[in-house]
Amino acid sequence: MGILAAVNRVYWHEFFFMLFAGISVVFAVCVLLTQNIVRMAFYLVLSLGSTAGLFFLAGAEFVGAMQLMIYVGGTLVLLIFGVMLTAQQRYVKMNTHPTDWVLATIVGGSLLVLLIGAAAGVDSWKDASASKKALAELDVDDARTATPLGLALTGVRVDKLDSDDPALANGQSGYLLPFIIVSVHLLVVLIGAAYMARTKRSATAPVGRAERARLNIMQMEHETDDVVYSASKQSSSSLLDSDQSQAEESTDEAQE
Amino acid sequence: MLLAESTALGSSIGAVATLALFVTIGLVFLFVNLLVGRFVRPHNPDAHPEKGDIYECGEPTIGSSFVQFDLRFYVVALLFIIFDVEVAFFFPWATVFGKSEQLSEMAQVEQAVKGNELSADAKRLYREMGVRDTSVGAVSDLTNEDVYTSSKMLARITLIDIGVFFAVLILGFAYVWKRGDLDWVKAVTEQRRLARLPADE
Amino acid sequence: MIGSLVSTGASTVTEFISQNIFGLDDPNWFMYLLCGVIAAVLVLHVIAVGALFFIWAERKIAGRIQDRLGPTRVGGKFGWLQTLADGVKLIAKEDFIPRDADAPLFKIAPYIAFAASFAAFLALPFADGAVAHHVNTAVFFVLAVLGLEVFGVILAGYASGSKWSLFGAMREAAQVVSYEVPLGMCVVIPVFVAGTMNLTTIGEMQAGWFNNWLVFHDPFTFIAAIVYFTCATASVNRAPFDLAEAESELVAGFHTEYSGLRWSFFFMAEYGSMFLVSALASILFFGGWHPPIPIDIWILEAFADPDLVAAGPLKDAVPSLVTFLVMLIGIATLVAKSVIGVVVMMWVRWTFPRLRIDQVMATCLKYCVPIAAVCFVGSMTWETLDLPSMNTINRYEIHEDWSEDLAVSTVGEDGVDPEWPEDENDDESSEVMDGEEAPIEEDSVAVQNGLSLQEGE
């Protein structure tokens, strides 16, 4: 029972922090060191996933789940699609030029300095007892609900209601404006993505020059040309092609 | 924090521990099954040179399997990310809206305030909204009417907020739909048919 | 909550095991881990044994729909041991990796798919108190974690080095990510009606007769339930949306190159996810662990009478047994409802023809998303205007589990008696009130932490 008692005194919060932070950092380094782009994506999943674990540990369950849904689930799918769209062959190697390393070190290093400076500037982190207190407050369950988050988006910060500053106490501390800006921002991204996709489509027309000339008029009308695999030297692309032409034929049949 | 100080592990640690435990158990379960199989199953990958080939319906494989994909997949993924972020914003909003509606419902049937004090249920609702001290802003003659008005107002404000948020994005969705960016194969079908037409004539 | 009428004090399976099996109220880390492992393994059985049952059921149902018998021989009358025999066969099959495959990723992919599907179960309550861990944002958590399964499929497709696999994986990725949008929109509707993301609370808000189910809240939730089920079918890759497998054109899609056990893990993950989305549908829309007829409430009512439980050696045992019984009824009900959902998915699979990828995308973007958006706005309006609803339960009387102790302590500080006289509650929801308002004297984690903090300083 000696060991049990000893391990009972393990600082579990610190233990899990170290565990997830370690996984996150190690796989982030792996992303840097590997050259295969899909493996990079895989390591990134693990790194971002354990970052979500850190959010859970901080009691921010909603943010943790959001990290999983949007970064791990969504952005990475996007990333892989990006790889599949641009890559020319299997086992895509990313060879980093030495100057890239220098540039990356400068950018990354300055960001690191900035972050360390910011972290050192937080008053409550300097005091050990204050952070212990914050940690204890974490275990009061209301830290884990997302409702205050929703209220803050509506414009009310419930944690500032008893504040001495009248402006904060009146509920003028929320994030209503950023919330609406986010929606406009998303709108811009949406339209931008659609626009980008469209221009790329017409830039990489699928067919030979003669046909292309014939298609030109139609493209102006439709602008939704889809096939990017212009290099039909590989049978694989014709495979995909036949996949589509089958679909196309059945559509034609359905129309007739 | 010491375990001794937090019964049954603190709640946030408990969540992480359970998550880690579940992932570990899942991985171990698969691993053990495969390990058991290792002693039972045959292993001779070099029995025949063609055994290591990729399956292409019995034909010899042609070309690399790594094909470039259509841009449409990318657009779909982009659309998804945008709407996913939006849906994620819906969730915290939804709890606020629901709770303020419930509060107003409670006030309507005169359950929110009893004897110029918030009832236990109302206090818990406020508590769930994140108000740690329900005595802030308390007035001496609190009535159900007051609670009803304030909670209904809050519900309407959140409604307008999300309405604007949603409307902006639906606008974008409608635009993308109208421009035909949501079309998948049909666009190319149309185009190919039109392209074929001169030849057919 | 109803369960806490005669509370055992356990709110999760882990605590339940540690209190009722080992008799520990304050387990040390080892016992806590042990209880957690037992709980996790119990949940694992839902996937592992569930897959055995569902694969057999699917073959039987498919057979019947196609006017065949399905499996008939192994294990006696209905061939019910067929899947087990298949499992033995799969263990004995060679675990083969093609030459062109990216071996490490090829091996890892099934682990990711399975772990994601399994980890999502940790926030799923099977009844009030029968949950591995209370995640307060459970609805969102389940959706997020379940969405990670797609990454295993993408890795499998990429790592196989096969064209079929890659096509299947890419289609799956596009399909799953797009269907997550209408799925999320439909899930938001019960969340704002209930005002919480806590699945246990949402379930408790549908206690009583079936008219309290959120699907009957208003016409829009009814439509949303149907849209949810459609999108859920698509997001777990079931026919008619099974583009990733697409047996008729892509051989076997993303798992073309997989064999033996490794191949079967994808199926376990798929059946696990099917069960999970069905269980989520039952909790969000179809009353969760409450039977359509309130048997659980009747039982609680019958035993709530203090005269009935005589004093004596069994005085304390009886209430906790009643709770346990009600919990078992709840678990059985939820599992039954989820199985019905899975069977409906099978029925759909063997009835409808497969959709083409453009049709799948059009179904999502041009039908499901707009319909879900209309339901969202409609249900929101319904709620704001206080239009009539079939739900008769007072939802404001049911709270998230954590706020209990905090509210009581706040009231205690104010020096007000926390128990309000309960004269108005003579309807069926009075049990709920009883359970809610009675200050539970058990030491909760939160209160203890608060106390220990005060002592420490």
Image: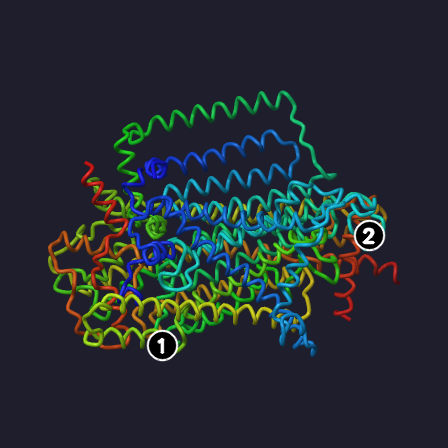
Which residue lies under the disc numbered 1? C295
Between the residue at mark 2 and the residue at mark 1, the CA separation in whole angstroms equals 72 Å
- Side of A117 relative to B112 (left or right): right
The kind of residue on which mark 1 rests is Ile
Q: Chain of mark 2?
A: A
Foreground: A191 or C17?
Answer: C17
Q: Position of residue C26 (x, y in %)?
A: 29, 49
Q: Position of residue A45 (x, y in %)?
A: 55, 41
Q: Which is closer to the viewer, label 2 or label 1?
A: 1
Q: Is residue A179 above or below residue A34?
A: below
Q: Chain of mark 1?
A: C
Q: What colour scheme was applied to this rendering of the protein?
A: rainbow
**Image mark for residue A214:** 2
- Side of C206 relative to B53 (left or right): left
**Image mark for residue C271:** none
In which quadrant will I find the C terminus of chain C? top left
Q: Position of residue B3 (x, y in %)?
A: 31, 41
Secondary element at image label 1: helix
The kind of residue on which mark 2 rests is Arg
Q: Residue at x 52, y 25 (%)?
A: A107
- Side of C349 relative to A12 (left or right): right
The answer to whether residue B167 is visible is no
Q: Residue at x 51, y 40 (%)?
A: A48
Q: Is residue A42 above or below residue C417?
A: above
Q: Residue at x 63, y 76 (%)?
A: C77
